Image (cartoon, grey):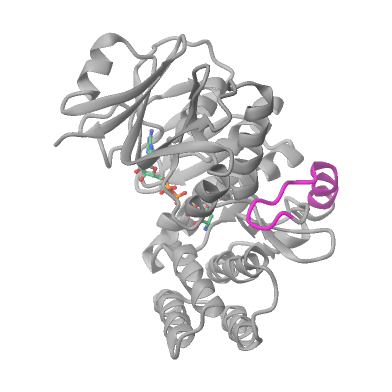
């Protein structure tokens, strides 16, 4: 059995859904098809959550209408029975009429997850209408997680049992990426961009022959083409390299996707939905051969440096306090470095969370803060690649391991 994953960009309009159907028809007989919310629907639903929690006149209705019209415009370009999509829109509307009582993250998951529900309802109805035996399957019934809203941790044993009891090769299974359910039956999500991970979970549990994630790029390139003009397609890469690239921020694959596949030796293909016959990239158990330098850029970074108020050293007790604070605030550290009396971290500039964290850290540390920075990671670097990315940049911090260098820089341009 094959597992296919189609992201938001691939199903952003009716033509995208038709293209998906053609790929499934020609290459995905009996596949499990994992689909994300259409286009930028997840962002639109996040806006809706904010409007629901801080209501201002007309805001909820306006946002709901945008989401409704967008999905209707896609449906109007397709043929099929889309009743279930309208039912989901009604469920959403009814939910928004109740007063906000729960916790932000819980409410977020109940609302945002409906993007994937609607996209799969549209895809499944269209596939069925084209004559492909299709089974719409609710991932919330299959992906068992704990109750960590927005970052659900998978209960692998339970998920494995449920998936193997449900998924068959009798039809194409169309299911949602990104979403799951807690033991008490509340919807959870697996973290932004988590649909790739869902595909890996299905593949792992089903011992799939392969996973293919269909993208708007030819495969994994040695840099994001949105940043670099001259990119090179990496035709074959090792699981290890793919994990490292994704972990450091190559957004083409969600970092959690690769490990389950590596454990079972399931190949991961990254291919173009625009050119579905092109081979793309395959990730598997390969020897490292051509060590082409790869570049990863993260913008809007903040460098936070901490100096203990009590003149103590940066040792276990201070470190555990610092990490505890970051974990509690839900802020991921992109890079860290310490000296005897200072500890520096680089994080994404998340203004929803950082100010409160800084307030807490200031109880124990003198805090300095530098924003507007870039974090550049080069895997398989040499001096010439470093020199190339440092043109017109001021270097604030550098960290090197055998294969990877990370540079925190300020743009001088
Ligand atoms: N190393 C890389 N190779 C290819 N694409 C990359 C790389 N790093 C970042 N990207 C970006 O990843 C995007 C595809 O991922 P994403 O937008 O998350 O797809 P989807 O939403 O369809 O899952 C590309 O458009 C590209 O800009
Ligand atoms: N829709 C979710 C999950 C996801 O993975 O989406 P995409 O495959 O379009 O990146 C998100 O936007 O976070």
Q: Quadrant of the N terminus?
A: top right
Q: Nearer the viewer, residue 152 or 356?
A: 356
Q: Is residue 210 visible?
A: no
Q: Nearer the viewer, residue 305 or 171?
A: 305
The x, y position of residue 210, in whole percent, is 61, 35
Above or below 285: residue 131: below
**Quick check: 190 left or right of 274?**
right
Q: Is 158 colored magenta in this rendering? A: yes
The x, y position of residue 317, in whole percent, is 69, 27
Above or below 69: residue 138: above
Q: Residue at x 70, y 59 (%)?
A: 139
**Quick check: 381 left or right of 350?**
left
**Quick check: 263 left or right of 29?**
right
Above or below 413: residue 120: below
The x, y position of residue 52, in whole percent, is 54, 79
Instruction: Magenta stretch: give its range.
Output: 148-164
Q: Residue 393: which quarter of the image?
A: top left
Q: Is 152 colored magenta in this rendering? A: yes
**Quick check: 408 left or right of 348?**
left
Q: Residue at x 50, y 67 (%)?
A: 46
């Amino acid at each position: 059995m094959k597992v296919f994953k189609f992201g938001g960009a691939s199903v952003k309009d009716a033509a995208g859904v038709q293209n998906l159907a053609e790929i499934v028809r020609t290459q995905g007989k009996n596949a499990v098809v994992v689909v994300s919310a259409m286009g930028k629907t997840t962002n639109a639903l996040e806006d809706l959550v904010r409007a629901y929690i801080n209501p201002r006149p007309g805001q909820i209705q306006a946002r709901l209408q945008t989401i409704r019209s967008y999905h209707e415009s896609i449906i109007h370009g397709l043929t099929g029975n889309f009743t279930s999509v309208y039912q989901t829109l009604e469920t959403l509307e009814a939910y928004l009429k109740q007063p906000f009582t729960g916790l932000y993250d819980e409410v977020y998951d109940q609302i945002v997850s409906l993007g994937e529900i609607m996209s799969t309802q549209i895809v499944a109805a269209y596939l069925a209408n084209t004559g492909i035996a299709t089974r719409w399957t609710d991932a919330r019934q299959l992906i068992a997680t704990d109750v960590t809203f927005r970052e659900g941790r998978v209960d692998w044993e339970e998920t494995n049992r449920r998936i193997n009891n449900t998924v068959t090769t009798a039809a194409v299974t169309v299911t949602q990426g990104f979403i799951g359910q807690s033991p008490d039956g509340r919807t959870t999500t697996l973290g932004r961009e988590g649909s790739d991970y869902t595909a890996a979970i299905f593949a792992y549990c089903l011992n799939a022959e392969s996973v293919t994630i269909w993208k708007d790029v030819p495969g994994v390139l040695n840099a994001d083409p949105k940043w670099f003009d001259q990119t090179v397609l990496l035709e074959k890469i090792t699981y290890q390299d793919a994990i490292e690239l994704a972990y450091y921020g190559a957004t083409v694959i969600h970092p959690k996707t690769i490990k389950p596949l590596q454990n079972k030796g399931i190949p991961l293909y990254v291919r173009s939905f625009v050119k579905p016959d092109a081979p793309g990239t395959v990730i598997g158990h390969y020897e490292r051969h051509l060590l082409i330098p790869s570049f990863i850029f993260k913008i809007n970074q903040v460098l936070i440096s901490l100096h203990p108020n009590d003149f103590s050293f940066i040792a276990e007790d201070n470190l555990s306090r610092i990490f505890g604070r970051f974990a509690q605030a839900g802020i991921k550290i992109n890079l860290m470095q310490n000296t005897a009396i200072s500890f520096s971290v680089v994080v994404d500039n998340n203004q929803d969370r950082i100010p409160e964290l800084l307030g807490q850290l200031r109880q124990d540390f003198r805090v300095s803060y530098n924003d507007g920075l870039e974090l550049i990671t080069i895997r398989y670097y040499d001096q010439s690649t470093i020199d190339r990315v440092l043109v017109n940049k001021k270097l604030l911090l550098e960290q090197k391991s055998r294969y990877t260098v990370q540079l925190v820089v300020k743009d001088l341009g």
